[in-house]
Amino acid sequence: GESVGLHLPTLSVQEGDNSIINCAYSNSASDYFIWYKQESGKGPQFIIDIRSNMDKRQGQRVTVLLNKTVKHLSLQIAATQPGDSAVYFCAETINTGGFKTIFGAGTRLFVKA
Amino acid sequence: KAGVTQTPRYLIKTRGQQVTLSCSPISGHRSVSWYQQTPGQGLQFLFEYFSETQRNKGNFPGRFSGRQFSNSRSEMNVSTLELGDSALYLCASSLSSSPYEQYFGPGTRLTVT
């Protein structure tokens, strides 16, 4: 069946270092891939997305890489800050007339000061 | 502009009862999606509504239903509650021009005893 998973359930990094969160997906028909950040007690927050016809997209301090050959998605956070501590979800969205979003299991990022 | 609001924020119900959760999307957003979040299953897609029509549905039993009103507000209903329905129920809205960029509400924490 369709699934989106994560290689690392937890990630601990030093403040100022770069973070890389990885994700594997299984549906070749997905149109968009999105990264969300969820802080405790809040709903997920959109970070960045990438179309299936792209392989890289950059935002403010974040970069998403898409490798369709191996069905792999990654989120790179530059100069990680304590405020980046949260659970990060990758998600794939499939357009079926409407759209359906499938989330990965999530990776918890700890930033050590 | 106000964000996505969900009511109630917390709810305790007994097995066998039914529950209705409400979601008010961001003004101008016509697409509303619902998700169930649990520690064991993560974020799972329930359904998506656009212009009062359900366009997509996830793999949940028929006890889970929803609807959308003409003002884009949405409700979801769970009948004959089971212990396993205890979860955080999240609503997300998006613009029809950017359907993949979803904005989430804080969720409704449902506990079934």
Image: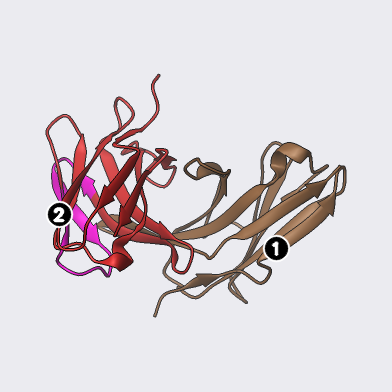
Chain colours: A brown, B red
Q: Position of residue B100 (x, y in %)?
A: 41, 47
Q: Quadrant of residue B87?
A: bottom left
B76 and B71: which one is in front?
Answer: B76
Mark 2: which secondary structure?
A: loop
Quadrant where the C terminus of chain A sits is top right
Q: Crowding at label 2, few (<14), some or many (≥20) Cα neighbours within 10 Å?
A: some
Q: Which mark is residue A10?
A: 1
Residue A24 percent location from the top left of the image: 59, 71
Q: Amino acid at mark 2?
A: Gln
How crowded is the residue under tag 1: few (<14 C-alpha within 10 Å), some, or many (20+)? Answer: some
Amino acid type at circle 1 is Thr
In the displayed structure image, the side of residue A71 where residue B90 appears, left or right: left
Q: Residue furthest top?
A: B1
Chain of residue at mark 2: B
> Outermost residue, bottom direction?
A1
User: Residue B51 magenta-drawn?
Assistant: yes
Q: Chain of mark 1?
A: A
Q: Indicate left or right for A8 with B39 as reference.
A: right
Q: Nearer the viewer, residue A68 or B95?
A: B95
Please give the name of the residue rendered at 51% of the width and 69% of the height, measured from the top-left corner. Answer: A4
The secondary structure type at the circle numbered 1 is strand
Residue B64, percent across and down?
19, 60
Q: Which residue is mark 2?
A: B18
Tell me the quadrant of the picture where the N terminus of chain A can be found.
Answer: bottom left
- Name the foreground residue: B67 vs B14: B14
Task: Give me the residue at 77% from left, 39% from top.
Answer: A82
Q: Answer whether residue B88 is magenta in the image.
A: no
Question: CA–CA distance between discs 2 and 1?
Answer: 36 Å
Query: Would residue A94 be visible to someone looking at this image?
Result: no
Magenta region: B49-66
